[in-house]
Image (tube, grey):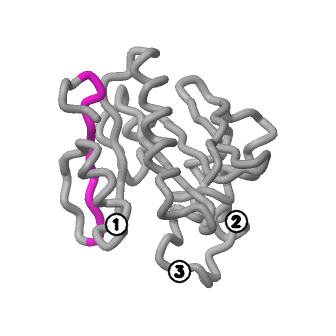
Amino acid sequence: MSEPVYRPVTPDDVDFLWEMLVAAAAWDRPDSPFTTAEVRRIPDYAKYVEEWGRPGDHGIVAELDGETAGAAWLRRWNPETAAFGFVAADVPELIVGVREAHRGQGLGSALVRTLFDQARAQGIATVSLSVEKANPALRLYERMGFEVVRDDPAAYVMTIDLLAPTYS
C-alpha cells in the first residue's frame, strides 16, 4: 500500500461519506442489497451523513494514489437525535468506512489515529462508537483502548479517553 494522504472532508465528499456509511453498515455483506439509496431512507443510518457540516462535524478522507479509499468522521448528538453509539451530548460518535479493496491493510487504524490526533487538538476528550459484536473491527477498537460502556444484544457501545496516557 502506498502512503495515504489525509485531508479534511469537504462538501464534495458527501457522496463518498454515504458510500463509506454503507461499507461500515454492511461490513459482513459484500454482496448486500444494502445500498446508498436504501441507507438514505433509513433514518437511524441516514443521520450519520445528512446535513453534513453541522457544528461539531469533523472528518477526514484517506486517498491512495489520488483515489478515495476510506473516511473517518465524528458527529455529535443530543438525546433527541441520538444515534446507535450515543453516550452524551459532549461525546462525538466515530464512524469509519474503508473500501473493500483496502481493508486489512491498516488503513482503518491509520484513519482513526489521524482523526483522533486532530480531535485531541480541538479539545475532544472522549469519543464513542457502536460496533456489532461479530465485526472484526471490534478487535481494532479494543487494541486502540476503547472500552465497552453498554452491551446491547447485537452490538457494543464503546468509548475511548483520548487524553489517557494509555491511548495508542
Instruction: Name the residue tied to disc 1.
Output: 132
Q: Position of residue 132 (x, y in %)?
A: 34, 66
Magenta part mainly helix, strand or loop?
Answer: strand
Measured along the vertical axis of the image, is residue 57 above or below residue 24?
above
Instruction: Tell whether label 1 touches label 3 (CB within 8 Å).
Output: no
Q: Nearer the viewer, residue 2 or 62?
A: 2
Q: Which residues are magenta?
A: 154-163
Q: Looking at the image, is mark 3 or mark 1 earlier in the sequence?
A: 3
Q: Badge 3: few (under 14), some or many (20 or more) residues near its Cα, within 10 Å?
A: few
Mark 2 neighbour density, 10 Å: few (under 14) some (14–19) many (20 or more): some
**Quarter that holds the C terminus:** top left
Which mark is first along the chain, 3 or 2? 3
Residue at the spot 70% in from the left edge and 48% down from the top edge: 64
Q: Amino acid at mark 3?
A: Arg
Left or right of residue 117, residue 9 in this image: right
Q: Could you say where residue 154 lies in the image, as x and y percent from the top left?
A: 28, 71
Question: Is 29 in front, or is 102?
Answer: 102
The reply to whether discs 2 and 3 touch (Cβ–Cβ < 8 Å) is no
Question: Residues at badges 2 and 1 in contact (C-beta under 8 Å)?
Answer: no
Type of amino acid under label 1: Glu
Q: Amino acid at mark 2?
A: Thr
Q: Secondary structure at mark 1?
A: strand
Q: Write down the residue under mark 3.
A: 29
Q: Which residue is mark 2?
A: 36
Give the distance between the C-alpha atoms of the residues marked 2 and 1, in whole angstroms. 20 Å
Q: Residues within 10 Å of mark 1 (few under 14, many from 20)?
A: some
- Pointer 2 or 1: first along the chain: 2
Q: Looking at the rendered structure, which numbered label has been put on residue 68?
A: none
Residue at the image point whose x is 58% and y is 64% from the top? 23
